[in-house]
Amino acid sequence: MTTPQQRAEPYVDLAYRVIFTDDETTDGHPIVVAEHPELPGCMAHGSNREEALQALADARRAYIESLIEDRLTVPLPEPTQTDSGDASETVTARVSAGTPVQRQPTEVVAA
């Protein structure tokens, strides 16, 4: 019998869209929030995009394992599309495991 962790493996490296948003903690320290819109509520933060993306990878794994444990459907990534928005606040990118984070705030990265 396979475990939820084993059943999650095919999903965790899929190219889910990532939205980065600059934010701050309640005491005013700057942070970057990263989230997967296809996985509602799956988000994480870090002091920079790299930290936020790594924390999001951990959150994505736990999120998908939880869905599998609860016998719920795991949403698949949406087809690649270009998003627009206020580039000073939000960056949208599509990344998969091992993809370096792009530095240009308006660039959309396709996996």
Image (spheres, grey):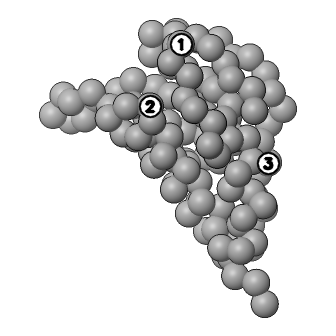
Measured in 3D between alpha carbons, the distance from the residue under mark 3 to the one under mark 1, in whole angstroms, is: 26 Å
**Residue in the picture at 74% in, 26% down:** 110
Tag 1: amino acid: Gln
Choose between 54 and 67: the one closer to the eye: 54
Q: Residue at x 63, y 36 (%)?
A: 99
Is any part of residue 37 visible from this angle? no
* Residue 25 sits above or below residue 42 on the image: above
Find out whether the residues at labels 3 and 1 contact each other: C-beta distance under 8 Å. no
The foreground one among 24 and 51 is: 51
Q: Which residue does the numbered mark 1 point to in the structure image?
A: 104
Q: Residue furthest right?
A: 79
Q: Earlier in the sequence, mark 3 or mark 1?
A: 3
Residue 76's tag is 3
Q: Position of residue 78 (x, y in %)?
A: 80, 36
Picture residue at 60% right of the left edge, 60% below the top: 61
Would you identify the image quadrant in which residue 15 lies?
top right
- Check contact, mark 2 vs mark 3: CB within 8 A: no
x then y, percent, for residue 22: 39, 24
Where's residue 35, x and y in %? Answer: 54, 39
Q: Which residue in the protein does label 2 denote?
A: 49
